[in-house]
Amino acid sequence: MNTDNTPTQPINLSPKSQLIFTVDIFQSGIAFGQHKLPKGHDPRDFYNLRVRDDSEVVRLRSRYTLHKQNPLHELERHLMRLSRQGLLRTATMYLGTTTDPFFPFEGKFDSSMRFLELFQRYTPGMLHVQTRSPLIVIAMPVFKRLGKNCSVTIGLETPCDEAVSRYTPGLPRVEERLKTARALRRFGIETNIQVSPVLPYGDWKADATNFAEILVENADHVYVRALTDGADTTERRIRGTSLAKKLAEDRKFHWLRPDTAAPLLQAIERLAPEKLREPERRHLQDKQVEMFAA
């Protein structure tokens, strides 16, 4: 993956590349990332909302340019530039990858709402808003106006509140997140559920179908990944995280394996295989054809 962290420079986009931008909100400002992802790669593998871990956030934040003085103005400046270059209407943008934009305990909510209002004036081809917070329902009118240019992803790593309390303390209860997903869908907003990483949900195989039924019932699309893919770099990265340490302390070693997600994925595949596929964005494809034909 080719990553360019200097968004003020011109962008050379080939037909074989996807244009991806990320916006993360910190107490000290925003991090704006600019990326060129090869076609055929699932962006969710790179830009899913991570489980909060302070050591992880510090490392990930170093990949981005942090704007501290007037973050709203900085974001607007970038969006204006993309619009002038004719790239905004084909760009994919993720709000919330290293930090949750609607996590209430960090004072982000007001900033996130202002950013969303800005996206109504400078609308990217696709805006993905990722959160675990029920507070996102307050922004439903904004999402409704953005229409097909917007989707919301709710993070839900386990259907068990005991596991939430143990491995991701401070995050909303399971039923609160599911109610949020149902409310968004009733409002006509594309709603996805991200299970990344998969956390203990009972018996690894026997309870996979129960979890799969919950996901299929409450989401338009589902994204599932294990904590690790088995690569040496990934293993080194997660080894020191509090999540991996707690799983090891509890002797839940099979939840640290690369194939942890297999039973859940197989159960979803049996129930609704179409929900595991990355959604097609016809409006983006049409605009890209127009741009390269011009």
Image: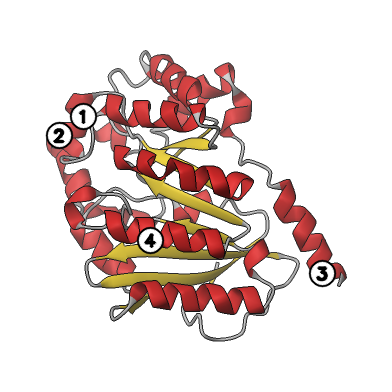
Mark 2 = which residue? 166
Residue 233 vs residue 276, the one in the foreground: 276
Q: Which comes sooner in the sequence, label 4 or label 3?
A: 4
In the displayed structure, 9 sits above or below 141; it is: below
The residue drawn where x is 68% and y is 47% is 281
Pointers 1 and 2 in contact (C-beta within 8 Å): yes
Badge 1 density bin: few <14, some 14–19, many ≥20, Cα 10 Å? some
Mark 1 = which residue? 163
Q: CA distance from mark 4 to mark 1?
A: 34 Å
Q: Looking at the rendering, in which quadrant would you find the N terminus?
A: bottom right
Mark 3 = which residue? 292
Q: How many marks?
A: 4
The residue drawn where x is 59% and y is 54% is 126
Amino acid type at circle 4 is Arg
Q: CA distance from mark 4 to mark 2?
A: 33 Å
- The answer to whether residue 195 of the structure is visible from this angle is no
Disc 4 is placed on an element classified as helix
Q: CA distance from mark 1 to mark 3?
A: 49 Å
Pointers 4 and 3 in contact (C-beta within 8 Å): no
176 vs 22, left or right, is left
Q: Looking at the rendering, in which quadrant would you find the C terminus?
A: bottom right
Question: Would you identify the image quadrant in which residue 12 lies?
Answer: bottom right
Q: CA distance from mark 2 to mark 3?
A: 50 Å
Name, please, the residue furthest toward the right. 293
Q: Which mark is residue 114?
A: 4
Mark 4 or mark 2, whichever is nearer to me: 4
Mark 1 or mark 3, whichever is nearer to me: 3
In percent of width and height, residue 290 lies at: 83, 64
- The answer to whether residue 154 of the structure is visible from this angle is yes
Q: Which comes sooner in the sequence, label 1 or label 3?
A: 1
